[in-house]
Amino acid sequence: MYIDKFFNPQSVAIIGATEDPQNITSIIIQNLFEMGFKGSVVPVNPHHDKVFGLKCYPSLLDINEKIDLSVIAISSSHVLEILEQHIGSGIKNSIIISSGFAEIGNKGVVIEEKVKKISRENGIRVIGPNCLGVLDNYSNFSTFFLPWSKVDLLPKN
């Protein structure tokens, strides 16, 4: 299934990962821990060696394991560079939470068009940009940046 890796990945790279509680990547990672996500969480940020006790990689190209999904939460000005890293690392699914695209005007439209071009030419499936991400209550996977304690879940029937 084409979208399975968005809702049930075995490994997810969090681009821009940090422990800063004001940063949405911190909330995303903590939510994954609190939900009991069984897959591998792989922080990516060239400014950190570890994030929440996990080895943090400077680039997607430095990761030795297969990554099913990336979650990009960095400045829109760096998103194209990260998508280029997807090509070299073989990552085919990405959620771009970052804002700063068509919603800000011409400069953002140009970046968004380049995102589309790179993604289409290289078979990278993208949700976003400027989105909340996904939530799957069945697989215990979420990329929402609302703290998990504030989310009311439907029961798993």
Image (cartoon, helix red, strand yellow):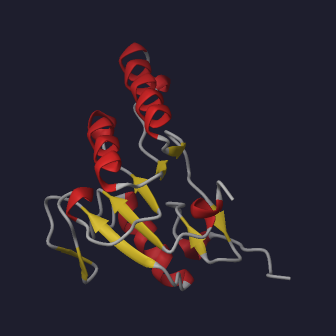
Residue shown at 42% from the left, 57% from the top: 70
Closest to the observer, 54 or 87: 87
Q: Which percent across, then down, holds residue 100?
A: 40, 32
Residue shown at 57% from the left, 63% from the top: 5
- Specify whether 119 is left or right of 23: right
Q: Is residue 16 visible?
A: yes
Above or below residue 106? Residue 127 is below
Q: Which percent across, then down, holds residue 21?
A: 33, 67
Which residue ends up furthest to the right in the rendered image?
A: 157
Above or below residue 105? Residue 81 is below
- Specify whether 27 is left or right of 7: left
Residue shown at 48% from the left, 30% from the top: 116
- Specify whether 26 is left or right of 44: right
Report the quarter where the N terminus lies: bottom right
Which residue ends up furthest to the top in the rendered image?
A: 106
Q: Which percent across, then down, holds residue 110?
A: 39, 18
Residue 52 occupies quadrant: bottom left
Above or below residue 53? Residue 66 is above
Above or below residue 21? Residue 77 is above
- Tag count: 0
Residue 138 occupies quadrant: bottom right
Q: Is residue 20 visible?
A: no
Residue shown at 47% from the left, 52% from the top: 92
Closest to the observer, 72 or 119: 119
Report the quarter where the C terminus lies: bottom right
Residue 91 occupies quadrant: bottom left
Q: Which percent across, then down, holds residue 149?
A: 57, 76
